[in-house]
Amino acid sequence: VQLQACGGGLAQAGGSLTLSCVLSGARMVINTWGWYRQAPGNQRELVASITKDGSTSYADSVKGRFTMSRDYALNMVYLQMNDLKPEDTATYLCNVNGHDFWNIRAFDFWGQGTEVTVSN
């Protein structure tokens, strides 16, 4: 099983980046995808999530600027980040949780993280 995130990089304030995350090798029912971020010295925080029925939720700090979407066929999620601010600088991590087809075993996978740096 592999959960791989990419798309991070350097952006100027007001700019945009799009992160993507793909799940491979897993045979499971996915309940929720989540994007988290962690800046040095800070706790990990949930930025955005999307449920299996497509419902999304966002942290107050990114509402109106970030949009999370999902490609069901490809087992991928995206995080479109617009109007970036220096305080968005962090390592962004992808998470997916769910269970096997018999709803016996639960799964919770994390990707390796992708760095986002926003400069003034």
Image (cartoon, rainbow, N blue to C red):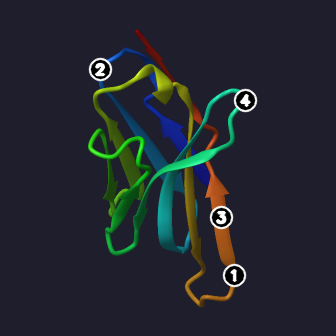
Query: Quick one: label 4 or label 1, which is nearer the N terminus?
Result: 4
Give the side of residue 119 with respect to residue 55, left or right.
right
Element type where label 1 sits in the image: loop
Q: Nearer the viewer, mark 4 or mark 1?
A: 4
Look at label 4 and name its amino acid. Gly
Provide residue 5's location: percent of width, then percent of height.
Answer: 51, 40
* Residue position marked by numbered label 4 in the rendering: 41
Number of the label disc, if any, that sits on residue 105 = 1
Q: Residue at 69%, 81% (x, y): give it.
A: 105
Look at label 3 and name its amino acid. Asp
Provide residue 80's location: percent of width, then percent of height.
Answer: 31, 39
Whether residues under marks 4 and 3 lie with C-beta atoms below 8 angstroms apart, the answer is no
Report the residue that reaches farthest toward the top.
Answer: 120
Number of the label disc, if any, that sits on residue 108 = 3
Query: Quick one: label 2 or label 1, which is nearer the N terminus?
Result: 2
Element type where label 2 sits in the image: loop
Crowd class of label 3 (few under 14; some 14 to 19; many from 20; radius 10 Å):
few
Element type where label 3 sits in the image: strand
Q: Say whether residue 115 is visible.
A: no
The image shows a total of numbered marks equal to: 4
Q: Nearer the viewer, residue 60 or 10?
A: 60
- In space, the residues marked 4 and 2 are separated at their CA atoms by 25 Å
Q: Nearer the viewer, mark 4 or mark 3?
A: 4
Provide residue 34's location: percent of width, then percent of height.
Answer: 50, 55
Relative to 9, say whether 24 is above or below. Answer: below
Q: Nearer the viewer, mark 2 or mark 3?
A: 2
Query: Quick one: label 2 or label 3, which is nearer the N terminus?
Result: 2
* Residue position marked by numbered label 2 in the rendering: 15
Query: Quick one: label 4 or label 2, which is nearer the N terminus?
Result: 2
